Amino acid sequence: MINKYLEKIKKILVENPLIPHIKDRLIFAAWIGGIILFSSLLWFLTLNTRNNILMNSVNQVLEHNNSSLRLIETMPGAGSHLSSMGTSFSADNNRSILVFSFIAEGIIFPCIALINEDGKVQDFIALNSHGRNILSRVSPAIIALYSRRIEGQNNE
């Protein structure tokens, strides 16, 4: 009885040319889904390592610029706290620092925002020489826009 049904299924699969195409597309979709799942898991599981590499790189730039400011550790809840702007770190003197990408004059450059205990942005520091040149030419309205956005997300 079961053999009859299996033979009918085999006959349908052999006679219908649409079935192999659907099977091939499903296999392709499964491969794409697997790659996306693997890459998202890899991105999520390497968050601490990426934050440590970022912290070390920023500390090297600050040391090269003869700044006494140093990043100490990632802020608790930094993955969800200011995730749309950048990564939040704690620094000396009970300040926090947000490392993010500043976009001005069509150029993206790394920048840090010094945030005081009240959650207000004190200053922006560009992390490269080209960014310092651009940051000095940026209008105060754009600086205020970035400040409000950072302070608004910091209060949420």
Image (cartoon, rainbow, N blue to C red):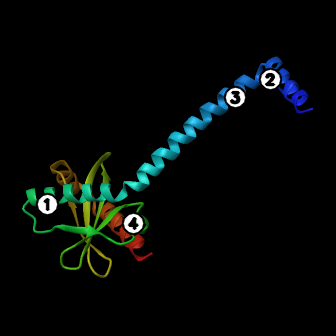
Measured as percent of width and height from the top left, residue 32 is found at 55, 37
For marks 3 and 4 on the same chain, the one whose residue lies earlier in the sequence: 3
- Location of the C terminus by quadrant is bottom left
24 lies above or below 56: above
From the image, state whether disc 3 or disc 4 is nearer to you.
Answer: 3
Q: CA distance from mark 3 to mark 4?
A: 43 Å
Cβ atoms under marks 1 and 4 closer than 8 Å: no
Q: Is residue 143 above or below residue 37?
A: below
Q: Is residue 94 above or below residue 63?
A: below
Instruction: Inspect the image, locate mark 4, and give the three-letter code of the amino acid beneath it.
Output: Leu
Q: Residue pushed farthest left? A: 66
Q: In terms of image quadrants, where is residue 102?
A: bottom left
Distance, label 2 to label 1, CA atoms, is: 66 Å
Question: Which quadrant: the N terminus?
Answer: top right
> Mark 1 and mark 3 in contact (Cβ < 8 Å)?
no
* Mark 2 surroundings within 10 Å by alpha-carbon count, few (fewer than 14), some (14 through 19), many (20 or more): few
Which residue is found at the position 25% from the left and 62% from the top? Answer: 112
Rendered image: mark on residue 23: 3
Measured in 3D between alpha carbons, the distance from the residue under mark 4 to the one under mark 2, in whole angstroms, is 53 Å
In front: mark 2 or mark 3?
2
Label annotation for residue 62 = 1
At a point 52% along the width and 46% down the height, the residue shown is: 37
How busy is the neighbourhood of tag 1: few (under 14 within 10 Å), some, or many (20 plus)? some
Regarding residue 101, the answer to whether it shows in the image is: no
Q: CA distance from mark 2 to mark 3?
A: 11 Å
Q: Position of residue 123 (x, y in %)?
A: 22, 68
In-image side of 153 versus 132 (left or right) = right
> What residue is shown with label 2?
13
Q: Earlier in the sequence, mark 3 or mark 1?
A: 3
User: In the displayed structure, does residue 101 sit left or right of residue 153?
Assistant: left
Looking at numbered disc 1 in the image, what kind of residue is underneath it?
A: Leu
